Image (spheres, rainbow, N blue to C red):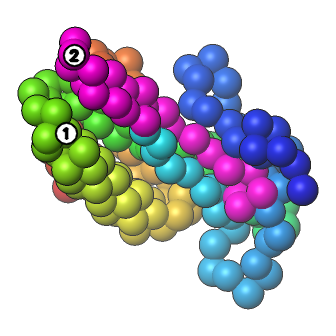
Amino acid sequence: MPSVAQDTLFWKAADTLTWNDFKGMPNRSARYLAISATGITYTYRYTDAGLNFQVRAFFVRSKSWRNYGTDLKVLKHEQGHFDITEIYARKLASQMQQLKPTKSNFRKSVEALGESIINEKNKTQKQYDLETGSGTKRKMQRKWETAIQQQLEGEPGCCKNEFYPGL
């Protein structure tokens, strides 16, 4: 089993996924060609200066898998999942920056916000797969790719409350 550092990729604008990043055991009976295990991690602490935090989007190699083939269109779709995760990591960071918690309520405030943003991310991920047919509906896939790119190139915290380009 690889170490956590080797198994976890943190999102970087200059890096994109390759099929070598998909180290998990494929599920041959799944209806999907690939699965990207992505998530948002955040740490925080309260100091006299206020809330200090770090938010990052990540990809877990050992839990991400692909079935047969090396179709680059499928890989691009999977990159979209990782990019959507980054968009919501930025949204969480932006909203954490705006929090003005007290020492007595900062944990509850941060955890509630984190849960809310992660739920939004999960909803968007499902919508992305639904509208693009998991990447098989090329026109809709391109529409999402454009919207994702626009979000990533925007200001930090750029995300609208609802991020569904297909609607």
Circles 1 and 2: CB atoms closer than 8 Å: no
The residue labelled by disc 1 is 106
Disc 1/disc 2 C-alpha distance (Å): 12 Å
Dot 1 or dot 2: first in sequence order is: 2
The residue labelled by disc 2 is 48
Q: Secondary structure at mark 2?
A: loop
For the N terminus, the quadrant is bottom right
Amino acid type, label 1: Phe
Q: Secondary structure at mark 1?
A: helix
Circle 1 Cα neighbour tier, 10 Å, few/some/many (<14 / 14–19 / ≥20): some
Q: Residue at x 63, y 17 (%)?
A: 14
Q: Residue 102: give x, y in percent of width and height.
A: 11, 32
Note whether 62 is above or below 152 in the view shown. below
122 displayed left or right of 96: right
3 displayed left or right of 159: right
81 displayed left or right of 64: left
Predominant SS along the magenta part: strand
Furthest residue toward right: 1
In the foreground, 55 or 139: 55
In the foreground, 33 or 27: 27
Q: Quadrant of residue 88?
A: top left
In the foreground, 117 or 123: 117
> Which contiguous range is marked in magenta?
43-64
Amino acid type, label 2: Asp
Q: Residue 140: give x, y in percent of width and height.
A: 40, 52
